[in-house]
């Protein structure tokens, strides 16, 4: 494992001049690197190295590492065959280049011989103080600094700087994760792939993100941990700073564990131990990429609720029942309304409506606007989160807009998270409308309620942690 | 309950001349009816009845029911207050109109008095042979016949005639259901809302759909059943005809059951009994609107697999592990590959790839095209469904298109369902591409694998049913 300082890693993630060893016009790697850098707004420079050409994709190339300008390169990306990686590192070191992103595969993931090669690689890096990401990874994006050293081709969405950090042991999977997060218009701080983790592990990067000031939510895709003690320490510090850690960890199934072993050469453990550990450390475990993204978004946009009670307000009895079932599935409490709330609602709603939680305001109740209804729920002491119905307008002139607008003014001053539940299909305009107001909203109720349950559980963990940590000094 | 003939209901669902009693320019009901009819391609005529005007929304109105043209009206939609419904029915009957869609609320769902009113309504309809849908419902759409008598305002998507029937006790929820189905470009045959079910129940309409020639998949949103014996008979006949029934039944939670009672005045039962009954009858139970729609689509587009084994092919170890975990969660078997398949794959894939299920073809394996890889999986006798990776192209000129194209030619002759798994975000073009080829595809793996598990389980039920039914005459 790597034992680098925070400053070393900060420098690793902020290069201005990047050499790309093995950049070739014959495959997609260097093209992807350039395209991602362009998208990120990178204004540094690339220095392709290729023994057979003076130019790759319109950029001046160098025949060898020794030809590179002296003292200028602050990161080298290696795309060369695994068999020549060690000698390449030696050449880079002689040139004074010790920050290396090793993309090449062909190490521990290929079997015993590859594993031995990776051991030699680790030994070399340790002896010579080389900061190494990889092998068998896709690189990183530093969205806050507008730097990208990333050779994958599947990250979509605008590379908006934001508060969510993403670390993944699998390149393709983490590309799907960062894309889902960016498409929800939640910006990211850093996106890091670790691959085989010869030196830098997912635990190292989690530690980095905890101390990184721009990161407020940490998300990870993990096949296997390598340093449980470090994970423990990182989780403790994250809890102290109220930074949630959300992890999609594969290996629940025997097949999944087998895959994890063969993929990045990780050691697969007992999954129940992982579950127990996560619970103890307040780590949020998710099961799918979609759930990970939803959970990251709710943590980015909502404060922590003071208690466990959710209040739901819809205009449909059928949906009320459906939501009640989903809440039970995810252990979300739907407390009864206070007597004063029931009386207020009885005065507001049609005669035949029966104020309850979930609240069915009925079609005609809804048409008068939700202002007073949502206000009375926000003032109900049994409720800690309020989830009112939201009808997506097509555009700003859509008459349904007023139904949502009626309760938006309450949200700024509300001391409880307000989570609109989208009825019927989402529109682009409505998505932007809710995002501009900084709101998390439920589009797919199944994943949405699961995200709400994570928010509630994490809030409970933080309360217990704060009570406990006034006496204890560590976990 | 209603005891109508199939022909009576067929006529009820195919009106040409529709009177709308209580059509008003002051609310949205009649406007919605007209808009839905226009979208459906309805070329019949509406006859609004309103004592205070000669025209509603540009259509000639009649001051009273007695003013309506004689012998012409074949359906009346009632939008009047519940207190005058009975006298209105009497006027309609005198005019020879006995097909009635009763939209008005204010019956059993409002409490004891409303329940008594609904009892009188039922008695009246029974005595006078009135075919009644409702009260407290939104009406219906007959997409096959291009007729709509529907007053909800939230159905989106093109009203394509197709093979999926949708019945819902809740109006708003079923609008969300039919919209999700239509948005997936799976056409619908009939869309029916039943509301309080004074006469026609969800069981009646399920029976109708089983015998309706255009319907091949039946989906329902149910708060409570009223006639378990009928449900049993319908399910038996559906199994005989290999028509899957997919039901979203609320009431798993105590809150959900409470809601069901107050919403449509239904009697709520023990949910475990429902689970057991569904299992016995081969009814597919789903938990969310999204899962219902996905399951309807997979049944519409895929034949039944011969066995339980799924083969997955991706280019990412991380995704392989994730999918393996999801398959275990939903009880989907991922059998080992046959020795001959492993040998074929070893020859096709890079040296370091290890043929297994899920199969990680690795990045470079994928780039050569999946033709032979998918073929060898289709020819593996351990596998009954094959799910290969699919990368959504932006348009027909997108170079990634060839990766998918490489295995499309195999699908027409394949005797196994092929279910592409979408990697990264779906595009409009790719959605159409897959739909044009009649393929079910997984976009959200969680719901997608759950739909696959329903397909596998239902196929097993049908095999057992066919073996059993050669001796038994009924369930």
Image (cartoon, coloured by chain):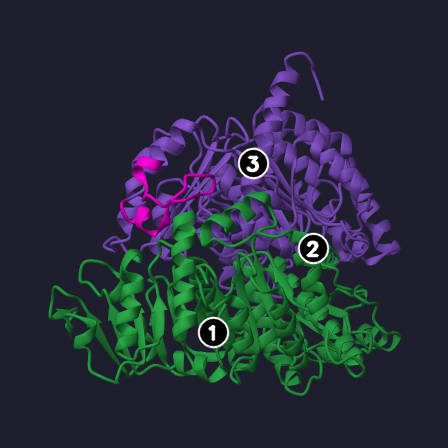
Chain colours: A green, B purple
**Quadrant where the image shows the C terminus of chain A:** bottom right
**Can you see residue A461?**
yes
Report the residue at 44% width, 59% height from top: A196
Residue B89 appears at what percent x and percent y?
A: 72, 47
Q: Kindly state the secondary structure of the residue where label 3 is placed.
A: loop
Assess whether mark 3 and mark 2 are in contact (beta carbons under 8 angstroms).
no
Residue B358 within the magenta-colored segment of the rendering: yes
Q: Residues within 10 Å of mark 1 (few under 14, many from 20)?
A: some
Residue B470 appears at what percent x and percent y?
A: 63, 13
Splitting the image into 4 quarters, where does residue B84 fall? Answer: bottom right
Q: Nearer the viewer, mark 2 or mark 3?
A: 3
Q: Nearer the viewer, mark 1 or mark 3?
A: 3
Q: Nearer the viewer, residue A186 or B221?
A: A186
Residue found at the very far front of the displayed protein: A127
Q: Residues within 10 Å of mark 3 (few under 14, many from 20)?
A: some
In this picture, residue B326 sits left or right of residue A102: right
Is residue B31 depicted above or below B196 in this figure?
A: below
What distance separates the C-alpha of mark 2 from that of mark 3? 30 Å
Residue A12 within the magenta-colored segment of the rendering: no
Magenta segment range? B346-368
Q: Kindly state the secondary structure of the residue where label 2 is placed.
A: helix
Residue underneath mark 2: A322
Q: Nearer the viewer, residue A225 or A330?
A: A225
Is residue B344 depicted above or below A145 in this figure?
A: above
Q: Nearer the viewer, residue A390 or A188?
A: A188
Q: Nearer the viewer, residue A368 or B164?
A: B164
Identify the disc placed on residue A185. 1
Label 1 marks a residue whose chain is: A
Residue underneath mark 3: B333
Residue B322 appears at what percent x and percent y?
A: 52, 51
């Amino acid at each position: 494992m790597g034992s680098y300082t925070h400053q070393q890693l900060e420098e690793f993630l902020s290069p201005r001049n990047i050499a790309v060893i093995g950049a070739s016009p014959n495959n997609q790697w260097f093209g992807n690197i350039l395209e991602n850098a362009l998208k990120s707004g990178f204004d540094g420079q690339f220095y392709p190295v290729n023994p057979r050409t003076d130019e790759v994709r319109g950029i001046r190339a160098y025949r060898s590492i020794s030809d590179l300008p002296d003292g200028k390169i602050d990161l080298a990306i290696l795309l060369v065959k695994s068999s020549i990686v060690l000698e390449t590192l030696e050449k880079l070191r002689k040139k004074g280049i010790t920050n290396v992103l090793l993309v090449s595969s062909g190490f521990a993931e290929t079997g015993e011989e590859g594993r031995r090669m990776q051991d030699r690689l680790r030994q070399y890096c340790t002896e010579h103080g080389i900061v190494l990401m990889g092998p068998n990874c896709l690189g990183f994006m530093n969205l806050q600094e507008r730097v990208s050293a990333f050779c994958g081709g599947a990250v979509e969405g605008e590379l908006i700087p934001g508060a969510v950090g993403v670390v993944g042991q699998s390149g393709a999977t983490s590309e799907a994760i960062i894309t889902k997060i960016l498409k929800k218009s939640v910006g990211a701080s850093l996106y890091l792939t670790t691959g085989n983790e010869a030196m830098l592990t997912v635990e190292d990067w989690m530690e980095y993100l905890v101390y990184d000031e721009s990161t407020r939510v940490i998300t990870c895709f993990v096949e296997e941990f390598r340093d449980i003690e470090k994970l423990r320490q990182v989780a403790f510090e994250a809890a102290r700073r109220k930074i949630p850690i959300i992890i999609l960890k594969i290996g629940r199934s025997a097949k999944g564990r087998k895959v994890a072993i063969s993929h990045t050469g990780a050691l697969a453990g007992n999954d129940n131990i992982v579950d127990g550990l996560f619970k103890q450390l307040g780590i949020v475990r998710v099961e799918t990429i979609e759930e990970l993204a939803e959970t990251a978004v709710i943590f980015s946009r909502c404060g922590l609720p003071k208690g466990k009670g959710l209040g739901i307000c819809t205009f449909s009895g059928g949906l009320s029942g459906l939501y009640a079932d989903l809440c039970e599935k995810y252990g979300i409490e739907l407390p009864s309304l206070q007597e004063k709330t029931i009386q207020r609602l009885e005065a507001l709603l049609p005669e035949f409506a029966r104020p309850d939680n979930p609240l069915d305001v009925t079609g005609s109740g809804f048409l008068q606007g939700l202002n007073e209804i949502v206000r009375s729920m926000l003032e109900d002491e049994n409720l800690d989160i309020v989830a009112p119905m939201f009808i997506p307008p097509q555009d700003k002139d859509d008459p349904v807009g007023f139904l949502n607008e009626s309760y938006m003014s309450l949200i700024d001053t509300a001391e409880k998270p307000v989570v609109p539940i989208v009825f019927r299909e989402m529109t682009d305009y409505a998505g932007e409308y809710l995002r501009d107001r900084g709101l998390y909203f439920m589009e797919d109720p199944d994943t949405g309620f699961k995200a709400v349950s994570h928010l509630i559980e994490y809030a409970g963990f933080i309360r217990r942690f704060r009570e406990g940590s006034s006496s204890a000094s560590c976990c």
